[in-house]
């Protein structure tokens, strides 16, 4: 990516100074070059990168991601590479590149006046990409899951602590993630930190309760059962009875810890997150008394339909609860950001209009060059972590100690199994065995669900 801090001066960005013809030509060439290299929709790259996933070939998708110029969109490129490496069972390599993304996000907390000025004059892709808050938290969640896969659950605990620090940086009422709190509780519980696990389960349930149906799923039964179970283990019977009544779990009885049993925790990353597109409209600006063209990111397509997963073990089948809806999170986050995006887009259009008028005063050629430059460089920021799943599903099952064959089955609306993931799991006394899988293929278009194979 071109270093905008060296190419653009505040005088040019103000649009109010006299600009000679040679400067205008140079700026036009530079801006068009930047547009071709940096402003092309990241969504178009994501479509190509995800093709392999949609055909059951994560290695092909990883090859495309690794070919991406590492100097461009460092954070988002690292996030995608990290997820694709984990899909290819390279958990060490996944955490190595996710750590790069994490450090770059921290670096971007610094304020760059020149970079921000360039984004006002050209487009928002010239701003460093830190990721939305939910993406930053899921970065820690997936690094924690990588550590769990590597048998280093203490590393997962460190990621949860770092996520807590990040959330505290966001204000007195931090923007928390329900799934991250739930995962945090599972990690604490597996490390024997029952009090901390209970606190995390409480927080997770409150987020689901207060924000369910907006950016989070309605509180799943799984978190309710886990909350009740730990309240019982801690002897907090008053709170236990209050929640049991609220949940209407009249017949629920908490499982007791036993050396004869352990727990199976299955997490399924189902589908793929939505890709941002771009839309441009003309709006009237009273400041310059003219219609101005502005571009902004949109989600062009509605949420995908997905097959429903279930876990089959010991001739029993268990539905999986939705614990994270990343599609909803992405759309909600963009909607929250849209007022600011439109304000900045309008301000940018005004700057471009003024530079265009100033250039026109220099002559028709100068005006034409600046007009072309402004049109070409007016692009929306479509960057996002597009290798995230559309949703995350969970099931927790108490099983006898020993080896078990489990199946994660994808089922259509007719109850027909259309795909199956097989796994051998060893259950240990009073411990949890995690099985974390990815399934990326959406429901085929124009094919009745009952006939999908």
Image: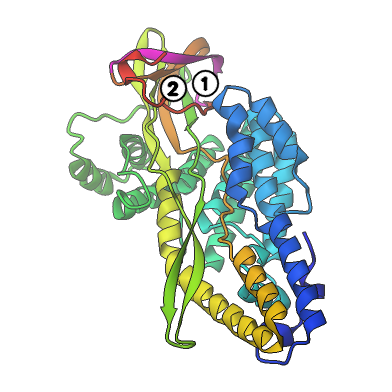
Disc ID at residue 429: 1
Dots 1, 2 in contact, CB < 8 A: yes
User: Quick one: label 1 or label 2, which is nearer the N terminus?
Assistant: 2
Q: Is residue 415 magenta?
A: yes
The vertical placement of 295 against 197, above or below, is: below
> Percent x, y for residue 325?
41, 43
- Residue 272 image point, x, y percent: 50, 36
Residue sitting at x 49%, y 75%: 292
Q: Name the quadrant containing residue 324.
A: top left
Q: Residue furthest bottom?
A: 17
**Residue range corresponding to the magenta coloring:** 414-432
Which residue corresponds to mark 2? 258
| Residue occupying image coordinates x 60% and y 42% | 46
Instruction: Pinpoint residue 419: horizontal percent, then vertical percent.
Output: 46, 15
Q: Quadrant of the C terminus?
A: top left
Q: CA distance from mark 1 to mark 2?
A: 7 Å
Q: Residue furthest top?
A: 315
Name the residue rendered at 70%, 39% in the picture.
65
Residue at far front of view? 364
Mark 2 is surrounded, within 10 Å at the Cα level, by few (under 14), some (14 to 19) or many (20 or more) other residues, namely few
| Quadrant of image for the N terminus | bottom right
Q: Is residue 400 visible?
A: no
Element on which disc 2 rests: loop
Q: Is residue 442 visible?
A: yes
Could you classify mark 1 by the number of other residues whose Cα lies within 10 Å: few (under 14), some (14-19), or many (20 or more)? some
Image position of 1 with respect to 145: above or below:
below
């Amino acid at each position: 990516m071109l270093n905008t801090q060296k190419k653009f001066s505040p005088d040019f960005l103000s649009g109010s100074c006299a600009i000679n013809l040679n400067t205008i030509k140079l700026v036009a060439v530079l801006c068009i070059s930047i547009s071709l290299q940096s402003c092309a929709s990241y969504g178009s790259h994501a479509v190509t990168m995800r093709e392999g996933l949609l055909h059951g070939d994560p290695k092909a998708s990883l090859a495309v991601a690794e070919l991406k110029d590492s100097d461009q969109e460092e954070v988002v490129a690292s996030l995608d590479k990290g997820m694709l490496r984990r899909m290819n069972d390279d958990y060490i390599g996944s955490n190595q590149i996710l750590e790069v993304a994490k450090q770059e996000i921290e670096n971007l907390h610094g304020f760059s006046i020149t970079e921000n000025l360039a984004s006002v004059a050209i487009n928002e892709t010239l701003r460093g990409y830190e990721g939305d808050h939910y993406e930053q938290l899921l970065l820690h969640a997936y690094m924690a899951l990588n550590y769990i896969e590597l048998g280093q659950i203490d590393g997962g605990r460190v990621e949860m602590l770092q996520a807590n620090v990040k959330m505290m940086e966001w204000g007195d009422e931090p923007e928390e993630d329900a799934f991250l709190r739930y995962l945090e509780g599972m990690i604490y519980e597996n490390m024997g930190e029952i009090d901390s696990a209970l606190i995390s389960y409480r927080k997770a349930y409150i987020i689901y309760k207060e924000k369910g149906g907006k950016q989070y799923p309605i509180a799943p039964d799984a978190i309710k059962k886990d909350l009740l179970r730990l309240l019982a283990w801690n002897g907090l019977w008053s709170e236990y009875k209050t929640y049991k009544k609220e949940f209407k779990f009249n017949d629920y009885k908490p499982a007791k810890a036993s050396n004869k049993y352990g727990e199976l925790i299955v997490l399924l990353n189902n589908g793929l997150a939505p890709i941002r597109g771009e839309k441009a409209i003309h709006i009237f600006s009273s400041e310059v008394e003219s219609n101005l063209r502005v571009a902004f990111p949109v989600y062009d397509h509605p949420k995908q339909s997905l097959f429903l997963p279930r876990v089959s073990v010991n001739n029993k089948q268990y539905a999986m609860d939705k614990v994270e809806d990343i599609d909803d999170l992405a759309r909600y986050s963009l909607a929250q950001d849209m007022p600011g995006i439109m304000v900045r887009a309008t301000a940018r259009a005004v700057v471009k209009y003024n530079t265009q008028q100033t250039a026109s005063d220099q002559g028709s050629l100068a005006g034409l060059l600046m007009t072309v430059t402004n049109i070409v460089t007016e692009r929306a920021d479509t960057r996002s972590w597009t290798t995230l799943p559309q949703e995350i599903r969970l099931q927790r099952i108490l099983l006898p100690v020993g080896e078990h064959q489990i199946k994660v089955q994808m089922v259509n609306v007719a109850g027909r199994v259309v795909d199956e993931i097989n796994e051998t799991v060893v259950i240990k006394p009073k411990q949890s065995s995690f099985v974390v899988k990815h399934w990326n293929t959406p429901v085929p278009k124009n094919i009745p669900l009952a006939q999908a194979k």
